[in-house]
């Protein structure tokens, strides 16, 4: 399996990240990214935070949905290539 490098944007900061396994589910990829960036799974008030992975195609942003038709989607399913720009989107769920 070839390793590729993506550019990840999170809150106006750009990170270069290596992806070793494109066949890993999007949910697992998000978990690894959040842990690699040492982000919290809860906000200051203790409310859970959900992260989404998205990408910019032209002027549009597309959210990479973790599940479609009961199947775990992978980065491979979304045709992610080396140098692609992905966005980590933070969603706080109010308690």
Image (cartoon, grey):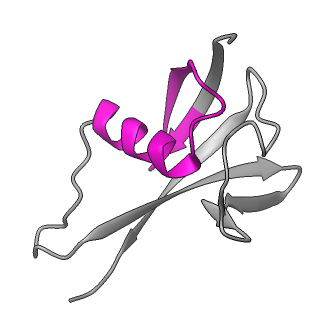
Residue 54 image offset from top left, x and y in percent? 64, 54
> In percent of the image, x 57 and y 36: which residue is there?
24
Question: In the image, is residue 88 part of the stretch drawn in magenta?
Answer: no
**The magenta segment:** 8-37
Q: Can you say which quadrant of the picture contains the N terminus?
A: top right
> In percent of the image, x 69 and y 36: which residue is there?
85
Question: Looking at this view, is 31 or 93 the one in front?
Answer: 31
> In percent of the image, x 46 and y 44: which residue is there?
28
Q: Is residue 69 above or below residue 20?
A: below
Residue 50 image offset from top left, x and y in percent? 38, 66
How many numbered discs, if any? 0
As drawn, the residue found furthest toward the bottom would be 95
As drawn, the residue found furthest toward the right would be 58
Q: Can you say which quadrant of the picture contains the C terminus?
A: bottom left
Q: Is residue 12 visible?
A: no
Question: Looking at this view, is 30 or 13 the one in front?
Answer: 30
> In percent of the image, x 53 and y 21: which residue is there?
16
């Amino acid at each position: 399996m070839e390793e590729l490098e993506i550019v990840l944007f999170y809150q106006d900061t750009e990170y270069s990240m290596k992806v070793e396994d494109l066949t890993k589910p999007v949910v697992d990829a998000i978990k690894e990214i959040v842990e690699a960036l040492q982000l919290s799974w809860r906000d200051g008030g203790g409310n859970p935070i959900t992260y989404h992975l998205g990408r910019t195609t032209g002027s549009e942003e597309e959210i990479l949905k973790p599940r479609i038709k009961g199947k775990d989607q992978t980065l491979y399913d979304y045709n992610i290539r080396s140098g692609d720009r992905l966005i980590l989107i933070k969603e706080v769920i109010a308690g």
